[in-house]
């Protein structure tokens, strides 16, 4: 969800593995391993995305979004899913993370723990992210 092209996705995956390897000696077991790993992955993705954005601005490359292949079967659900992902790509990194957690059915408490926020702050940010996404979809005629 954070990277558009497969090469960037592979680079991000490699960076997440590297950051996990570096951070593993500091894992104290105070949370589930999956929670700890997920937090590293999200934080790495957000930083990676910020760095990619800086590079793009430096080289004046336009930001690209998911391309819907003409060869693909275009049923209504696939089109809606693609439109949703395009809209999510327009959100800032924190809002993307919040929407991702929401789509994965994480509770407000789990989201707060993952992002290092208070539960109330996580709920407020989630509602704002959903509103931004709704506005983007509405602006695109959906």
Image (cartoon, helix red, strand yellow):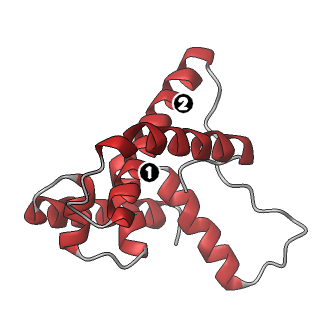
Residue at x 30% of width, y 60% of height? 129
Compared with residue 125, is residue 4 higher up or lower down, i.e. above or below?
Answer: above
Compared with residue 125, is residue 138 higher up or lower down, i.e. above or below?
Answer: below
Furthest toward the top, the residue is 58
Looking at the image, tell me whether mark 2 or mark 1 is earlier in sequence order.
Answer: 1
> Looking at the picture, how far across and down is residue 47, in whole percent?
42, 36
Residue under label 2: 52
> Toward the viewer: 61 or 28?
28
Q: Is residue 108 visible?
A: yes
Snapshot quadrant of residue 73: bottom right
Residue at x 17% of width, y 67% of height? 123
Q: Residues within 10 Å of mark 1 (few under 14, many from 20)?
A: some
Residue at x 10% of width, y 59% of height? 118
> Toward the viewer: 14 or 43?
14
> Toward the viewer: 78 or 48?
48
Name the quarter where the N terminus is drawn. Answer: bottom right
For the residues carrying marks 2 and 1, which lies nearer the camera in this image? 1
Please state if 14 lies on the left or on the right of 116 as rendered: right
Furthest toward the right, the residue is 71
Q: CA distance from mark 2 to mark 1?
A: 16 Å
Marking on residue 41: 1
Compared with residue 63, is residue 107 higher up or lower down, i.e. above or below?
Answer: below
> Looking at the picture, how far across and down is residue 100, in whole percent?
42, 65
């Amino acid at each position: 969800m954070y990277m558009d092209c497969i090469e960037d996705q592979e680079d991000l995956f490699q960076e997440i593995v590297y950051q996990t390897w570096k951070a593993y000696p500091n894992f104290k077991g105070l949370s589930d391993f999956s929670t700890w790993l997920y937090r590293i992955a999200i934080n790495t993705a957000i930083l990676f995305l910020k760095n990619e954005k800086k590079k793009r601005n430096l080289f004046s490359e336009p930001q690209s979004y998911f391309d819907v292949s003409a060869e693909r079967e275009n049923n209504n659900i696939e089109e809606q899913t693609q439109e949703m992902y395009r809209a999510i790509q327009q959100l800032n990194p924190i809002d993307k993370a919040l929407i991702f957690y929401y789509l994965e059915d994480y509770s407000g408490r789990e989201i707060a723990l993952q992002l290092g926020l208070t539960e109330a702050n996580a709920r407020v940010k989630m509602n704002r992210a959903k509103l931004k996404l709704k506005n983007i979809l509405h602006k695109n005629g959906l």
